[in-house]
Image: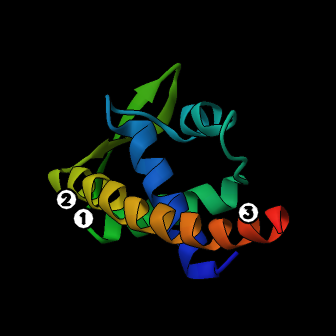
Amino acid sequence: MDIQLKKGLLDVCVLAAIKNGDSYGYKIMKDLKPYIVLSESTLYTVLKRLETSGMLTVRTAEHSGRLRKYYRITDSGRTRIAEFKTEWREVMQIYQFVAKEDEENEKA
């Protein structure tokens, strides 16, 4: 898979994992696990990229005597999810075109 496409998919997956409320690294990984498996290093790279681009904010709070970072989606992050949905429809149209040729060849 194209690295830029994969990078964009990971960003949107992480945003979607926190769109309904603040979350933290371990919980994000757990929420994504049924759909995509990420290493901790990949997740934290994505989180840092999303923070830098203004798509999420970070706060630190104490939990069980330890500091934990909580991530919150911003309006910019929500906009990115909406853009992704529009872009994905276009990708699916292209996929259907490509798959259609395969289906026609199988029928012949």
Whether residue 48 is visible here, answered yes or no, is: yes
Q: Which sits earlier in the primary sequence, circle 2 or circle 1?
A: 1
Of the numbered discs in the image, which one, if any, rests on residue 89? Answer: none
Residue 20 location, quadrant: top left
Q: Is residue 69 visible?
A: no
Kind of residue at disc 3: Glu
Q: Is residue 42 above or below residue 16?
A: below
What residue did someone put label 1 on?
A: 54
Residue closest to the eye, 8 or 61 = 8
Dot 3 corresponds to which residue?
Answer: 103
Q: Quadrant of the C terminus?
A: bottom right
Mark 3 neighbour class, 10 Å CA radius: few under 14, some 14 to 19, many 20 or more:
few
Residue 107: image x %, image y %? Answer: 81, 62
Q: Secondary structure at mark 1?
A: loop
Name the amino acid, label 1: Gly
Q: SS of the residue at dot 2?
A: helix
Find out whether the residues at labels 2 and 1 contact each other: C-beta distance under 8 Å.
yes
Q: Are the residues flagged by discs 1 and 3 in contact, CB closer than 8 Å?
A: no
Going 48% across and 37% down the picture, which residue do you hit? 24
Q: Quadrant of the N terminus?
A: bottom right
